[in-house]
Image (cartoon, grey):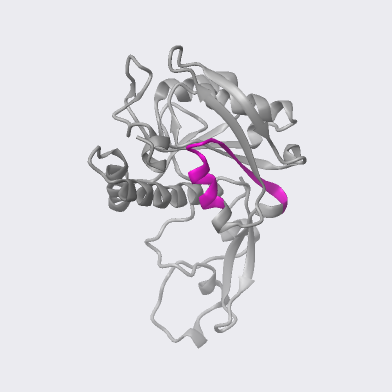
Amino acid sequence: AAATSAAALGVTVSFAEGQQASATKSAEWYMKPWTSFQKEPVMADQVPGYDRVHVMRRTFYSVHLMGRLRDASSSRDQFVDAARKLSVMLLSEALGMLPHTPRPIKTPVDGAAYITFDMPDPQRELCVVNIMRAASSMSDVMTREYPGIPVGTVLIQRDEETAEPVMFYSKLPPDVDKRRVILVDPMLATGGSIREAIAVMRKAGVHEQNIIVVSIVAAPEGVDAVLRANPLVRILVGEMDRGLNARKYIVPGLGDFGDRFYGTV
């Protein structure tokens, strides 16, 4: 990632807030428009023990939404509402993990300067791929935010007897090899479906370092399985759970995401 400080752009920054009128402040005062106690922009928190695995920053609100998802007594409407809100938060974190270049701009007030970041253009440089059907809920959030972003689909179902993935169908944008891919699947359990989807994309020419896997909950076993096969992939999760039970379900988990989201329990 590119350096993010104003100093990296050759600009001297004064962090003193001062009380004098704006007309008497130096141009450098405007280079830090937030108050001094606020932090520089950062990526999602790194999971201890992993170089390329990140977890969404927890807030009281995010934990409230996670509780709605996990609560067995939540209605379908409550589940869907929480899933959509968490997907927005997660995908915002995922976009923040993309390459970025700092660029100074001028605001309409006093010619004040502000440092923004140029990010990849969603329509020309990005792509979202979902693993049907549960992940369609997450890719729908992305297309609402960025209507022109291409969407790829992979249909992989888990054999309930063996817990192994079975590939049925895939359709990717024709230029997917030239894009950065956000691969969405709400639950990363054994990692089998994610591994299969990444294999499909790699066959289409996508470099694994250009893939960000985004899941709402994950088990360490699945994360490890994905990284063993694709060590350069980045993974972003809402929360990392304790692990898998004997039936290969995530614990504490949230049940079957697709059934609860689409009302087919």
**Range of the magenta residues?**
124-142
Q: Position of residue 151 (x, y in %)?
A: 64, 45
Q: Nearer the viewer, residue 157 or 36?
A: 157
Q: Is residue 4 above or below residue 13?
A: above
Question: As rendered, which of 73 and 5 lies closer to the eye?
Answer: 73
Q: Image quadrant for the N terminus?
A: top right
Q: Is residue 47 located in the magenta-colored stretch of the structure?
A: no
Q: Position of residue 116 (x, y in %)?
A: 59, 63
Q: Position of residue 165 (x, y in %)?
A: 53, 20
**Left or right for 87, reference 249:** right
Q: Position of residue 142 (x, y in %)?
A: 55, 51
Which quarter of the figure has residue 121?
A: bottom right
At a point 34% along the width and 34% down the height, the residue shown is 265
Is residue 44 in view from this perspective? Answer: yes
Residue name at image x 57 percent, y 23 percent: 195
Q: Is residue 81 above or below residue 73?
A: below
Which residue is at 56% across, 26% downward? 156
Give above or below for 250 relative to 153: above
